[in-house]
Image (tube, rainbow, N blue to C red):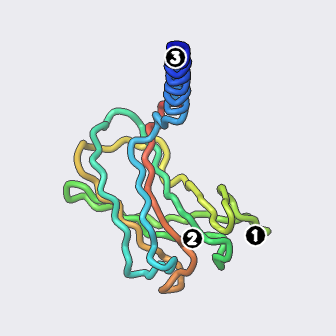
């Protein structure tokens, strides 16, 4: 009976060590913020503006900003245009962003699983936030279609640019 308890204790220690190892290697130490928002029924109406509210503390280190897009394989375009409005402390900046989702031959870029394709598209590189505080990032689809089909979700990712 003592031998059985000893073997169970050893097995539990090994499993715990393996789980800690997997957890440590899966940590994303570059990520400052990442949030994705589902698009209802996979149809993004132009009036449906997606907001991300981010509390920024670091004004010294450079950051990279990404737009996350998940599209279905039947999405009818190879790109997507967005109006991205960033506001904080009364300062509002509006950008037009083009994300390329497929190459010239129609092959989807990004990573795919089944009929869904995930893209992390660089929006801004090595930027420094001018002040600490709350920033609001608002996405508006800017395609010619008022109802953009087969966009499943969109997101924002902010990374520390200095960490390799």
From the viewer's perspective, is 135 left or right of 140? left
Question: Compared to 14, does 66 lie above or below?
Answer: below
Give the residue displayed 67% in from the left and 68% down from the top. 115
Q: Secondary structure at mark 2?
A: strand
Point out the tag, 3 or 2, that comes first from the N-terminus.
Answer: 3
Q: Which residue is mark 2?
A: 80
Q: Relative to residue 75, is residue 89 depicted above or below?
A: above
Label 3 crowd (10 A; few <14 / some 14-19 / many >=20): few
Q: Position of residue 18 (x, y in %)?
A: 55, 27
Kindly report the distance in space between the C-alpha atoms of the residues bearing marks 3 and 1: 64 Å
Which residue, given by chain and number where applicable, does mark 3 sit on?
A: 1
Residue 14 spot, x, y in % from top left = 55, 22
Q: Which mark is residue 33?
A: none
Residue drawn at x 41%, y 55% as measured from the top left: 35
Most extreme residue toward the right is 105
Tell me the residue at 49%/37% (across/down).
Answer: 28
The crowd level at tag 1 (other Cα within 10 Å; few <14, some 14-19, many 20+) is: few
Which of pointers 1 and 2 lies earlier in the amino acid sequence?
Answer: 2
Q: Is residue 159 left or right of residue 129?
A: right
Quickly name the residue at label 1. 106
- In the orientation shown, which residue stands out farthest toward the bottom? 146
């Amino acid at each position: 009976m003592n031998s059985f308890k000893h073997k169970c204790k050893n097995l539990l220690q090994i499993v715990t060590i393996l789980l800690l190892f997997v957890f440590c290697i899966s940590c994303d130490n570059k990520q400052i913020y990442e949030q994705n928002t589902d698009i209802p029924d996979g149809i993004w109406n132009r009036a449906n503006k997606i907001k991300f509210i981010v509390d920024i503390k670091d004004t010294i280190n450079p950051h990279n900003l990404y737009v996350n897009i998940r599209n279905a394989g039947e999405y009818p375009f190879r790109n997507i245009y967005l109006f991205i409005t960033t506001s904080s402390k009364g300062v509002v900046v509006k950008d037009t962003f083009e994300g390329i989702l497929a190459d010239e031959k129609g092959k989807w870029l990004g990573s795919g699983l089944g009929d869904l394709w995930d893209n992390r598209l660089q929006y801004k590189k090595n930027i420094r936030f001018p002040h600490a505080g709350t920033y609001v990032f608002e996405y508006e689809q800017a395609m010619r279609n008022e109802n953009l089909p087969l966009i499943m979700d969109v997101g924002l990712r902010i990374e520390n640019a200095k960490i390799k």
